[in-house]
Amino acid sequence: MRTDPRLRVYCGTILTVDGQRVVQLVDPNDNARRRFQYRRTLDGTGIEQRTLRADGQPYTDTGSPWEPADVATMRRIRGDYHPILDSLGL
């Protein structure tokens, strides 16, 4: 899957995780190089997020659970392009 050049500006890529489209962002200023992943909820109305270590492994032994993301805040700061909302088709 090709990554939109606008998404690359945010150090982002599109992945497929468990058969779902996922936006992965890495903050170049984060010394831990954590990976922030976002996907649509199963019902398609919201967004879930999780954080992984730089090596792609979860921070805990129980895995890295998907948690609800604040879509309202993302929409408020949307502007012309939003790396998460636009990449996930919201």
Image (cartoon, rainbow, N blue to C red):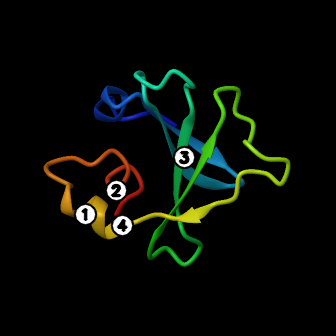
| Amino acid at pointer 2 | Leu
State the residue in front, 63 or 13: 63
Whole-percent x, y for residue 78 in the image: 20, 55
| Amino acid at pointer 1 | Arg
Earlier-in-chain disc, 4 versus 2: 4
| Amino acid at pointer 3 | Gln
Q: CA distance from mark 1 to mark 2?
A: 8 Å
Q: Is residue 63 above or below residue 40?
A: above
Q: Contact (CB < 8 A) between labels 4 and 2?
A: yes
Q: Is residue 61 above or below residue 40?
A: above
Q: Contact (CB < 8 A) between labels 1 and 2?
A: yes
Q: Which residue is mark 1?
A: 75
Label placed on residue 71:
4
Q: Which residue is mark 3?
A: 37
The quarter of the rendered structure image containing the C terminus is bottom left
Q: Residue at x 20, y 55 (%)?
A: 77
Whole-percent x, y for residue 47 in the image: 47, 65
Identify the secondary structure beneath mark 1.
helix
Q: Which residue is mark 2?
A: 85
